[in-house]
Structures are given as C-alpha cells and as structure tokens.
Amino acid sequence: MSRTRTALLAAMALVAGATGSAIAAVPGGAGAAAVPCTVDYKVQNQWDTGFTASVTVTNHGAAKSSWAVKWSYAGNQKVTSGWNARITQSGANVTAANESYNATLASGGSATFGFQGSYSGTNAVPATFTLDGVTCNVDGGGGPTDPPDPTDPPPGNRVDNPYDGAKVYVNPEWSANAAAEPGGSRIANEPTGVWLDRTAAINGAGGKMGLRDHLDEALEQKGSGELVVQLVIYNLPGRDCAALASNGELGPTEIDRYKSEYIDPIKTILADPKYASLRIVTTVEIDSLPNLVTNVSPRATATPNCDVMKANGNYVKGVGYALNKLGDVPNVYNYVDAGHHGWLGWDDNFGASAEMFKQAATAEGATVADVHGFIANTANYSALKEDHFSINDTVAGKSVRESKWVSWNRYVDELSYAQALREKLVSLGFDSKIGMLIDTSRNGWGGANRPTGPGATTSVDTYVDGGRYDRRFNTGNWCNQSGAGLGERPQASPEPGIDAYVWMKPPGESDGASKAIDNDEGKGFDRMCDPTYTGNPRNDNNMSGALPDAPISGHWFSAQFQELMRNAYPPLS
C-alpha cells in the first residue's frame, strides 16, 4: 500500500506514457529517451524528533556490479542507523552504497534500503538524487501525512488487541485428533492455528478442510460474540532454507507463483464480505527473515540455500507482498514471525533481525501500518519464563551469560525476549501499539524433571543447568523435542505488551520425519529430526534431542502428543 507523490525535477518535464510510466522529454528532440534511474523516497513513520524512511532506486541503464545513491538534505536531518546499504553522512550530504549481497543492480532492477534519522523543525524530502553521479527522476516523497491509499482499510476498524473479549477458533480436524488420543479430551477444545503450508491447502488437500471450510465453521462457532481465527501463512519460495524438514513446494525463484497462486487467492477469500465479522489473525512466514540474518555467509552457520534467498530477495519480497495484500482486508491482523530468544537473542542477531523485519514490512508496497504485531517462539520450545536464574545473576565469579547454556545470550526466556523486541521494533518506527504473541503450545517443560529451585552454586553451569525449565541439549534444537510439555493455555493479554499466549503450532503435529520418507508435499529429511544426530554449528554440535519414529512435518505424531500431555505445565487435571 504505497503512498507516493511525483516530484518534477527542474531539469526535465515528465511525460506520462500510455502505460503510466514516466519518461523524460528531451528538449528539442523528436522523441523521448528513457530516464537513467528513478528514486522513490518514502518517510514511513515520523515523530517529534525522528523518522524512518525507505528508499528504492531503479536502474534504467546498463547493469551495475556496484552502486551508490547520493542526496542532500535542506534541513538538519541526520541518519542514525540504516539497513541494506552502507550509509554515511557528511554535513547535509548522504551516500548510500550497496552491501556485498545486493551489489548487482540489473538493467530495470531495483534495490531498496532504509534508515532511521533525527531532525528538528521540518523534515522535507530531498529534491535531487543521483545514482553513481547521474541525476535520477524522483517518484515518491510520500510519508505519514499523505492521503491514505484507496485500498487501506478505514481507520478504526481494527481493535487494539484482537484477542481481547473474543473466543478463538477451535480447528475441528485437530480437535478430533486430540480427542481420539487417550486423555486428549482434556485439551481437545483448545484453539490452535490453521496452517496453509501449500497452495493445495487453500482449497483443501487430501480430504482436509480448505480455508473457506474453516471460515464457515468459524462463523458457526462465533455465534453472537467475537471470534479470532488463527492462520499460518507459510509457503515462501525456497521456504525454510536452513531446515530441510519443512521445505516447501516453490523453488527459490518462484516469487510470482507465490503471489498469484498463493497470496492472491487467500486474500480473495479473506476479503469475502461473508467473513467480515471474524477477526482473522495471520502468522506470516515463520523462520524466513531470521534465516537471512543468522544462516548466511560469512557466518559459520551459513547454508547455501539461505545465501541464495538473501541474494535474490524473495523472502523479503514475499513477506512484504503478503503483508501488503492481506493488510488490505480490514478484519485481518498481521503478525510477523520473530524467531525466538534462543535464535535471535544475541547482540549480533537482535538488532539486525529487527531491521530485517522493518525492511520486509516496507517492501512490495507494504508499510508498517500493515503489521499489527509479531509472534515469538512459533512451533518452538523455548521456556516462557525461567524463574530460577536471571541474566543479572553471578555465580562463582562468573555471569550467567558465561554459562554454556546461555552462551552470552542477552535473554533467558521468551517473555523477556518478546517484550524487549517489541520496544526495539517501536524504536525503528513500528506503531507504539504493536502487540506480541508467544506460542506456548510446547514450552511447558513440566513433569518429574521440572526444577523446583535454582541449581547448585558450585559453578555457573551447575547453577543454570540445575534450575532451568527448558531441558533441551541446546536452544538451537527445534525438532520433536524429547521431554517437552504443553505450556500455558491460550489466553488474551497475559502480560504487558503481549496480546496473547497462543497455540499456533497444533500440539501433536510433527516437526519433521526422523528418517527420510517419500512424500508429495515437498518436505525433505533434516538430520536435526534424527535422534542419533550429533549436531552442527547451529546447535553448537549437540545431540538433536529429537523423538524417534516421527512422521513428516504436519502429520499426526501420537507419541509426541502423549509426551506433551504428560509433561504439561501447568499440569493437566
């Protein structure tokens, strides 16, 4: 939902062609020559002393192997941080040069970067931009004071927290699986997410309910009150570049298919007036954006697939497109996946990931207004709150951060991580009212092994290991974890800044197969799902901790379901 205006350059008059594109009229010439480049500069968010902006440069000339965009401010604006470009400033003059991963700028290709800045007085849009010394046409300059995009939903339609005062949809298919298990009736009426993990899931695959079926059922469950439906949007091209178990149907370059065959049909269904009374919460593309920070070169955790997805930009484009299109539906609430503390809590991951989220939220016509919040710990196992140690504790002369388990992370649990990430995202220009969701479906870690107090103070490791609820070998372990239990039951507004605890991952549905299994869903075999696997740099070369005999991801795993109930915390009655 772009908000743009066209600024005419003093040196040329722009003529609108039949296609609506801008061309530069050549004085005295017999025709029109293509402009060398176009810059679209948008102020995304602005407050009393600062702002965030997004800049897209489009190259209409020969392909480039490197590039630099320059402009000058008329006021006292200062760039304080940036992303997707190396931005420097001298006085009023700003230079934004490519990063190594986006150095190539094809003919007709675009590059987008963003930054945060400070100002006082007025915050005028720069009048002139150059690309490698050549003056560009300016297409943009929009900002928060521009008139709304015609497709933006009317203001005030969305509530601050969609979960407040509302029931949440119970997926009858999951409920039937749960109820069929011994003891499963105790939780069979809990709400869980509906995963749209391939194009066929939209209309229903393998005899399962399609999206319209779920929404029709939601209307039945709604009655006269409010009801939230939770959808997981999960089908990016080159999906899950660091975990083969949940690879998807689309290849790394198939962004156009993602848009036209997946997102567009979902939007059409969600926009049906029949469903306007539902509050539809989307979890947008789990695991994608964090991979572009932590699992790319030159990191030791890099994978070739993630390098490809960072270079082609299709994760960012796909997430931006999804936010833009789904955000057009007035009763849709988009929550972007934000990893978990055991993935992004380190200093070199935390800020970079927040900036990556901002980049995607301002790509493909999306704006920060299309993001209602973020979700942490989706389909993961990180403990909600560690009660027996904190990041500020010191034992035997060493900080808890020095323990093998914490390993210099700045967060020890999901609640502290989610609340801190929310503050960071607001500082980057997201709305101050954004809320966080935390997936508590499998992070209870109860049962006989749940500690009742801190560990021994003989060393920082005995102290942390003896007191921690999370019993994994390493926070990088993610597949069908042995010993895990159901966590806090879904509830609205449990803590400041937290919109809800949710069960977005349906308990009992596998994370991935423990051995290679042929399937028609595009899902591969990942050794992290093999209980005999001794690990890799992404889990500090620890054992995988996975349960044996697991089916492919998304399929029912009875043994896991029973273990989750057995180790539930709070316990099941």
Image (cartoon, helix red, strand yellow):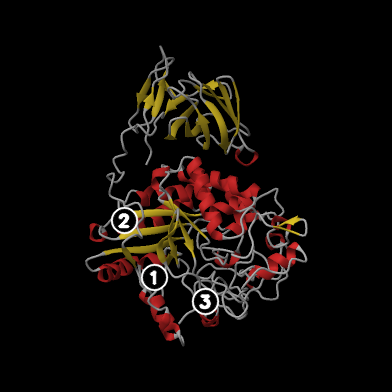
9 up-or-down from 387: above or below: above
- Which SS class for mark 1? loop
Q: Is the C terminus in the top left, top right, bottom left or bottom right quadrant? A: bottom left
- What residue appears at the point 38 percent right and 38 percent down from the top-left corner? 2
Residue 349 in percent (x, y) is at 62, 49
347 up-or-down from 266: above or below: above
- Which SS class for mark 3? loop
Residue found farthest to the left = 224
Residue carrying label 1: 191
Residue 143 seen in render: yes
152 up-or-down from 389: above or below: above
Q: Could you say which is closer to the camera, residue 206 or residue 90?
A: 90
**Which quarter of the picture shows residue 478?**
bottom right
- Which SS class for mark 2? helix
Q: Could you say which is closer to the camera, residue 555 or residue 46?
A: 46
Q: Earlier in the sequence, mark 2 or mark 1?
A: 1
| In the displayed structure image, the side of residue 319 where residue 326 appears, left or right | left
| Distance of label 2 from label 1 (alpha carbons) | 24 Å
Residue carrying label 2: 268
Residue found farthest to the bottom = 182
What's under tag 1, amino acid-wise? Pro
Residue 253 in percent (x, y) is at 53, 52
154 up-or-down from 276: above or below: above
| In the displayed structure image, the side of residue 136 where residue 227 appears, left or right | left
Q: Could you say which is closer to the camera, residue 433 or residue 448?
A: 448
| Distance of label 3 from label 1 (alpha carbons) | 16 Å
Residue carrying label 3: 568
In this rendering, the count of numbered labels is 3
